[in-house]
């Protein structure tokens, strides 16, 4: 057996711990021991059934935080895998295989090894390095990063820059980083009518007929034009239900679920008011229950994005693209601290799939990119 690099060795050790959300299975203990050994003050923050930790090394000055999660999504049917999902090995094609290889134990190993090297090379670095690690990113995420961030905010913990290890790359490592995400706002609309016999419509009020023009107007509305960083805000109806299942009854109620993916050009309150104004305009007897899944965040070009882009260029020769596409991530919670947040990790082609894998050599490049970013931001 050939010996593995420190990054691959650690990635395999993490993958072999079957930490399906919200379990951690000792991944964080392993990380905390390694960080303590290179001078970090380590603070477990277990909240309800979720393991999290915060670790920090250094004094005054700018703080660069590495963030991520030790939990992984379930394997799905084992017979669909070509190998045991938690075996962790590098195959003959140079792919590191196993659940979490790409999302995101490979990144965790790369960050930790990069930091160990940086601290050895620059023991008197400026500012501070931190880690914010959770075991509940893939689940409800209530007692994970969000809860840790609330605690950090309460004690005025400074966080200038944050690199989240989510697999941001599309086909080659470093080809894309995420410098923001759209917000997500859900609405459950109920429109009340009056139930009756279809042969006596004058005695009933059909909520489908009443709601249809309003829904058409909502679907056709131009919410904003987006901006240089975000596409225009989109509105989508995901569920529409009404009726009793019989042909001769006018239903008494209509239910509709819809979602906004919104840019920084719109606000939650603004979108809510505009939806409600359209419903009022159509004279509906309506009610909307709103739930916000995440505010949009954006890291504009600045010290962090510059350092990350320059490091990717130096290590891979690639010009990275900064994008706000994709779903939400824990970056949205960290950004509320006023932190510049960039997601940078390996290729995301197989995440959450069976036979999850990542090019082993990409994890070496990622380690080097994280290392160079540390040098650019914190070397004296
Ligand atoms: Zn992830």
Image (cartoon, rainbow, N blue to C red):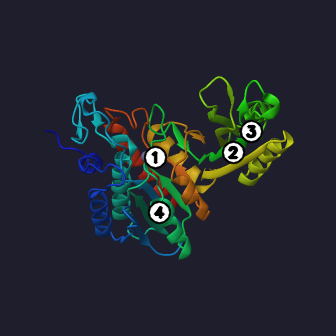
Q: Disc 1 designates what residue?
A: 166
In this rendered view, identify the residue nearer to me: 203 or 330: 203
Ligand 1 has an atom within 8 Å of the beta carbon of the residue at disc 1: yes
Q: Earlier in the sequence, mark 3 or mark 1?
A: 1
Q: Disc 2 designates what residue?
A: 263
- Using the numbered discs, state the Cα–Cα distance from disc 3 to disc 1 in whole angstroms: 50 Å
In this rendered view, identify the residue nearer to me: 95 or 348: 348
Q: Disc 3 designates what residue?
A: 194
Q: Is residue 300 visible in the rendered structure shown here?
A: no
Q: Residue 379 carries which label?
A: 4
- Using the numbered discs, state the Cα–Cα distance from disc 3 to disc 2 in whole angstroms: 38 Å
Rendering coords of residue 203 (x, y %): 80, 34
In this rendered view, identify the residue nearer to me: 61 or 350: 350
Task: Tell whether 9 sits left or right of 20.
Answer: left
Number of numbered markers: 4
Q: What element carries label 1?
A: loop
């Amino acid at each position: 057996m050939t010996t593995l690099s420190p990054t691959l060795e650690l990635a395999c050790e993490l993958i072999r711990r079957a930490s399906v959300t919200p379990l951690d299975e000792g991944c964080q203990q392993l990380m905390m021991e390694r960080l303590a050994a290179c001078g970090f003050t380590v603070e477990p923050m277990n909240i309800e059934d979720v393991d999290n930790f915060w670790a920090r090394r250094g004094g005054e000055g700018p703080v660069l935080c590495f963030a991520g999660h030790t939990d992984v999504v379930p394997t799905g049917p084992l017979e669909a895998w070509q190998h045991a999902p938690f075996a962790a090995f590098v195959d003959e094609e140079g792919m590191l295989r196993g659940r979490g290889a790409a999302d995101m134990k490979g990144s965790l190993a790369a960050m930790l090894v990069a930091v160990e090297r940086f601290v050895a090379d620059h023991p008197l670095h400026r500012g501070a390095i931190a880690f914010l690690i959770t075991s509940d990113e893939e689940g409800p995420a209530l007692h994970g990063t969000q809860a840790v961030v609330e605690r950090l905010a309460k004690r005025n913990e400074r966080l200038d820059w944050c690199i989240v290890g989510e697999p941001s790359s599309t086909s080659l490592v470093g080809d894309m980083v995420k410098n923001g995400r759209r917000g997500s706002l859900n609405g459950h609309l109920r429109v009340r009518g009056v139930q009756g016999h279809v042969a006596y419509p004058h005695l009933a009020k059909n909520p489908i007929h009443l709601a249809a023009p309003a829904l058409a107007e909502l679907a056709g509305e131009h919410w904003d034009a987006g901006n240089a960083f975000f596409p225009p805000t989109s509105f989508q109806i995901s569920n529409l239900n009404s009726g009793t299942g019989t042909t001769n009854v006018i239903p008494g109620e209509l239910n509709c679920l819809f979602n906004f993916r919104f840019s920084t050009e719109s606000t939650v309150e603004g979108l809510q008011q505009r939806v409600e104004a359209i419903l009022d305009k159509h004279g509906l007897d309506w009610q909307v229950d709103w739930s916000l899944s995440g505010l949009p965040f954006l890291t504009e070009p600045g010290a962090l994005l510059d350092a990350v882009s320059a490091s990717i260029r130096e290590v891979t020769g690639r010009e990275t693209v900064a994008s706000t596409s994709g779903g939400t991530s824990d970056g949205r919670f960290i950004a509320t601290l006023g932190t510049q947040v960039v997601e940078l990790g390996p290729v995301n082609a197989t995440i959450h799939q069976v036979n999850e894998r990542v090019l082993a050599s990409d994890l070496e490049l990622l380690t080097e990119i994280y290392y160079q970013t540390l040098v650019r931001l914190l070397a004296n």
